[in-house]
Amino acid sequence: MATVGNLQIYYGATDRYEPLPSTSTRFKVAEAVVKLALAILESPEGKESIVKKNPFVHIYREPLEDMGYWVGKFLESVKEDFPLVYISENVAGEAEAERLPWGRELRNYNAAIAGRVFLSKVIIDNMVYAREKHEIAGITYNLFKFQMGISVAHEIIHLLTGFLTGESRPDTPPGVTMDPFGSRDTGEAGRYWEGILLGGIVECWANKNDIMGVRQSGTPYLFETGHSNSNGWRISSTYIESFINGVFSFPIRVSNPAETLTRSSLKRAQSQETSNLRTRRRQRNAPPTASPAPGHSSASIAYRRLPANCEQYPVQTAPVQFYLTQPVNRVPPYSPYSESSSTRSYPPQARSYYPPSSGSSRSYDPYNRR
């Protein structure tokens, strides 16, 4: 799995972020997600999805024959000096990215100052809980890792947009998207990339009988587009097992191509997309994690292997490796992520912890990944 240099992770909410020690369980969970995301993008198919498919030719100003070189430089910078990561209550989906002004010379790009990445606090806490309660959680942690690895890779693609343009703006061109995401004026580069590499959109849908309740990962499906009547399929369990261990093949493999469903049919079966479980109201009664709060060392808490007798999905077959990171010495330049600028609307029962407010940051890509 990819190594990550100078990884700094903060935990909390607006104006209340605290640095996590690299020995903490939450740090290691987030680190595993970031490593998986980078491994996806650094795989041969991942690089090809960016370079040979040319999804960003409309915003790239250099000679096309040099694009492969610059994409490699971008990934190298991200891997060596990853942007600040915030495990935040403000995230409406799984993850979000904020692009920041950094300059215009590609050779001078520094990923650490060119953007920031935000991870859903609810999902990271759910992953910690799944590790602690592995006897009942089964492969819940692995399914979350699969979902979050793809989500963070999606957000890194938004940072790539800022790298290729040399600015936090302009927006992604409207043609660089997947139906029906984006708008008349702006595209959605992350969704465009998902369509090219993954073959569609990965979403997890809840099971009302899941023993994990609101902390469940749900069942992962692959949908062709974002429309409610788009064809979808359950993702292969053996594919997920290989994927989270860094053995990639694309597009995503489904369990049975003949078993087609839609989001509408899942709703009729009383299922719902798992983002609806991550509201403040529903999470209020979630069982607490035993992991110490930020500021306390949890070095003695080791990663636990998941049981090997789970039937629904296999468990990972090899322990996750971790790499030492540099000391926490990089202080956020200002209070991060003061508001969400997502333009999506949610039904009342599905609102995020901090519903989007009016007036978004000009430097923020307005499409989070759900």
Image (tube, rainbow, N blue to C red):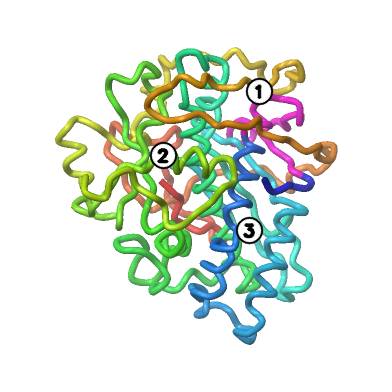
What amino acid does circle 2 point to? Pro
Q: Residues within 10 Å of mark 2 (few under 14, many from 20)?
A: some
What span is colored magenta in the figure?
A: 7-29
- Residue at the location (74% across, 60% down)? 77
Magenta-span inclusion, residue 239: no
> Helix or strand or loop: what does disc 2 sit on?
loop
Mark 1–mark 2 Cα distance, whole angstroms, equals: 34 Å
| N-terminal label among 2 and 3 | 3
Q: Is residue 351 left or right of residue 102?
A: left
Disc 2 target residue: 355
Disc 3 target residue: 42
Q: Is residue 205 left or right of residue 113?
A: left
User: Looking at the image, which is closer to me, 98 or 290?
Assistant: 290
Q: In which quarter of the image is residue 320?
A: top right
Disc 1 target residue: 303
Q: How crowded is mark 1: few (under 14 residues within 10 Å), some or many (20 or more)?
A: some
- Residue at the location (16% across, 41% down)? 265
Q: Is residue 256 left or right of residue 113?
A: left
Percent of width and height locating residue 232: 27, 49
Mark 3–mark 1 Cα distance, whole angstroms, equals: 25 Å
